[in-house]
Image: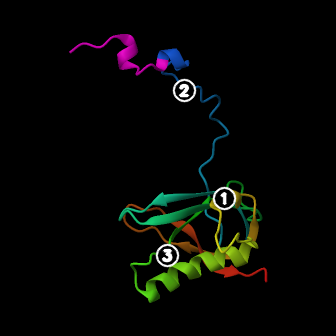
Amino acid sequence: MSFGTDDMNTGAATKGFSGFVDVGNLDDVKEPELVPAGDYTLEIIKAEQQLSKNQDMMTHVSFKVLDSGVDNPNIIHTYMLHPNPSEEDEVNNSRKLNFKRLIESFGIELVDGRLDVNLIAGYTGQVTLGVQPAKGEYSASNRITKWHSKY
């Protein structure tokens, strides 16, 4: 089977794609750095709902460290599984606790008992970060070890 230019590019040529990526000057690009363990102010930069590997609903929240003293601090990621009526109460309590910590640490208001993840970017809160050592294929990373309530 032969393909014409438009078929191989899946119409990219008509959308202005050339196959090249303009990355500009790479001299100032830096690897992200771990921040030392301690208390920090984080800002939520992104939150979205996703499916876990087991096809369970979860919320992925990305945070920027505002006061680390590090030139290019790591982005902190937290994944929270949603409560599920088919799970045991103990499992759901743990899942709800993760959301409660986020909501209370960042002063997020619920609407009719619901968290709208599309509206939480920009909220700031206080947490304690730890350093999780590298393990297997995973590099060392910062993790939230304690959430500090605003209330």
Colour pattern? rainbow
**Residue hosting label 2:** 21
Outermost residue toward the left?
A: 1
In what element is the residue under mark 2?
Answer: loop
Locate residue 115: give its quadrant: bottom right
Name the mark nearer the viewer: 1 or 2: 2
Nearer to the camera, 84 or 73: 84
Quarter in which the N terminus is drawn: top left
Locate residue 91: give its quadrant: bottom left
Badge 3 or badge 1: first in the primary sequence: 1
Can you give x and y, in whole percent of width and height, for residue 144 in the image? 61, 74
| Labels 3 & 1 near each other (Cβ < 8 A) | no
State the extent of the magenta-drawn residues as a range: 1-12
Quarter in which the C terminus is drawn: bottom right
In what element is the residue under mark 3?
Answer: loop
Q: Is residue 2 magenta?
A: yes
**Residue hosting label 1:** 73
The three-letter amino acid code for the residue at tag 1 is Pro
Local crowd size for mark 3, using a 10 Å CA cut-off: few (<14), some (14–19), many (≥20): many
**Residue 38 in view, yes or no:** no
